[in-house]
Image: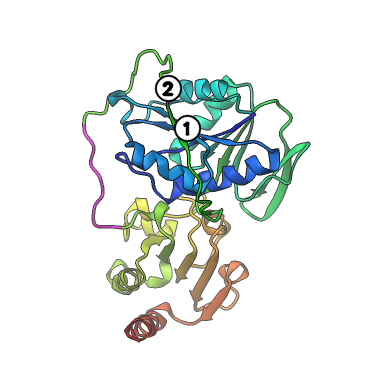
């Protein structure tokens, strides 16, 4: 009874996300007294696949082919389901990113499996199998029992520590029956020269307290100093001050960086729902009663326009030492 984890790759390379998933799966497997098999779809070199063993995978099932360079939900679902059946997996784990959210419900139906989504910690118990997840926009936590023989889990990004185990993984080729690949990608345009919001460990975000798009220089400068991504609240993107791809919140991107700096953001529940899983939240706002301070680990009451320059100077001085 193995645990199967789908390890997504980007142009044949794994990111921290994949290692985080394998680390999480390793602990789940330990609770179940079993091993991990990772399934990789697409063209990935064996040297790259072998890295998964360092995080706990005992086997890597590789499915190669030029037709798997882009996600086809139906095809990928069939591949993962066949890999799960081949490995005798009773738990299948994916990331709670865009691809995982497309695949997990399909897998749940195909495998007749209960689905535990957007998890941020290990199962509460395995007999019975109970998972804990945030509910009511992160205001509470609920325990959910998964009573089916097979379970499908999705793990929220940056919610589990990456743990190196120093192990080795056997690599095994697998050729599933997938049928026709229906999705054809004719053109790919990738963002370059910028840290992607979902991958960022540090995020500097601004709200209406920044007063206008012309004042975003301090947000960008601080982000550059910290090696961070930039983000914004929904009113900011609605006003056109920042692109919609930077909008975080319930109706935008849900993120969980190690550090989230919120400048001039009041902290409406819709925004907090998208950032409440941040490891550390620093808030800057003129209103001492702003809701953002209830969620903040550190709070500064003051005008972000005046505080950010001091913040930037402090970072520069610290980096110069």
Q: Quadrant of the C terminus?
A: bottom left
Query: Residue at the location (49% across, 26% down)?
Result: 80
16 vs 87, nearest the viewer: 87
Query: Residue at the location (48% across, 60% down)?
Result: 257
Q: Is residue 238 visible?
A: no
Q: Quadrant of residue 315?
A: bottom left
**Residue of label 2:** 174
Whole-angstrom CA distance, mark 2 to mark 1, is: 23 Å
The first of marks 2 and 1 along the sequence is: 1
Asked whether disc 2 touches disc 1, contact meaning CB atoms under 8 Å apart, the reply is no
**Residue 292 pos. (x, y %):** 56, 68
How many labels, in total? 2
Q: Quadrant of residue 202?
A: bottom left
Number of other residues with Cα within 10 Å of mark 1, as a class: few under 14, some 14 to 19, many 20 or more: some
Q: Is residue 15 left or right of residue 268?
A: left
Q: Is residue 121 visible?
A: yes
Q: Is residue 211 left or right of residue 4?
A: left
Q: Which mark identifies residue 316? A: none
Q: Is residue 261 left or right of residue 148?
A: left
**Residue of label 1:** 102
Residues in magenta, as a range: 187-194
User: Quick check: 130 above or below 184?
Assistant: below
Judging from the image, what secondary structure is the residue with disc 1 in? helix
Our reading of the magenta stretch's main secondary structure is: loop
Judging from the image, what secondary structure is the residue with disc 2 in? loop
User: Quick check: 116 above or below 68?
Assistant: below
Number of other residues with Cα within 10 Å of mark 2, as a class: few under 14, some 14 to 19, many 20 or more: some
């Amino acid at each position: 009874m193995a645990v199967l984890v789908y390890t997504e790759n980007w142009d044949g390379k794994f990111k921290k996300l994949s290692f985080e998933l394998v680390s999480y799966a390793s602990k789940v497997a330990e609770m179940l007294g079993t091993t991990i098999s990772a399934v990789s779809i697409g063209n990935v070199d064996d040297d790259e696949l072998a890295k998964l063993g360092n995080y706990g995978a005992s086997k890597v099932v590789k499915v190669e082919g030029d037709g798997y360079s882009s996600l086809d939900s139906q095809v990928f679902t069939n591949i993962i389901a066949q890999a799960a059946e081949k490995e005798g997996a009773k738990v299948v784990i994916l990331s709670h990113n865009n691809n995982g959210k497309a695949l997990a419900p399909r897998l749940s139906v195909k495998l007749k499996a209960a689905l535990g989504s957007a998890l941020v910690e290990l199962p509460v118990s395995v007999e019975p199998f109970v998972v804990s997840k945030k509910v009511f926009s992160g205001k509470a936590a609920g325990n959910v029992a998964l009573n089916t023989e097979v379970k499908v889990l999705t793990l929220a990004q940056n919610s589990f520590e990456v743990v190196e185990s120093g192990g080795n993984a056997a690599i095994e080729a697998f050729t599933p029956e997938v049928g026709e690949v229906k999705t054809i990608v004719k053109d790919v345009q990738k963002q370059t020269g910028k840290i992607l919001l979902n991958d960022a460990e540090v995020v500097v975000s601004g709200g209406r307290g920044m007063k206008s798009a012309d004042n975003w220089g301090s947000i960008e400068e601080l982000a550059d100093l910290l090696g961070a991504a930039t983000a914004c609240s929904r009113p900011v993107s609605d006003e056109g001050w920042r692109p919609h791809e930077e909008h975080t919140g319930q109706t935008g991107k849900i993120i969980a960086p190690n550090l989230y700096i919120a400048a001039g953001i009041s902290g409406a529940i819709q925004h907090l729902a998208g950032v409440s899983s941040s490891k550390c939240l620093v808030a800057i706002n003129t209103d001492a009663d702003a809701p953002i301070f209830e969620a903040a680990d550190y709070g500064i009451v003051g005008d972000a326009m005046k505080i950010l320059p001091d913040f930037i100077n402090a970072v520069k001085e610290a980096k110069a030492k």
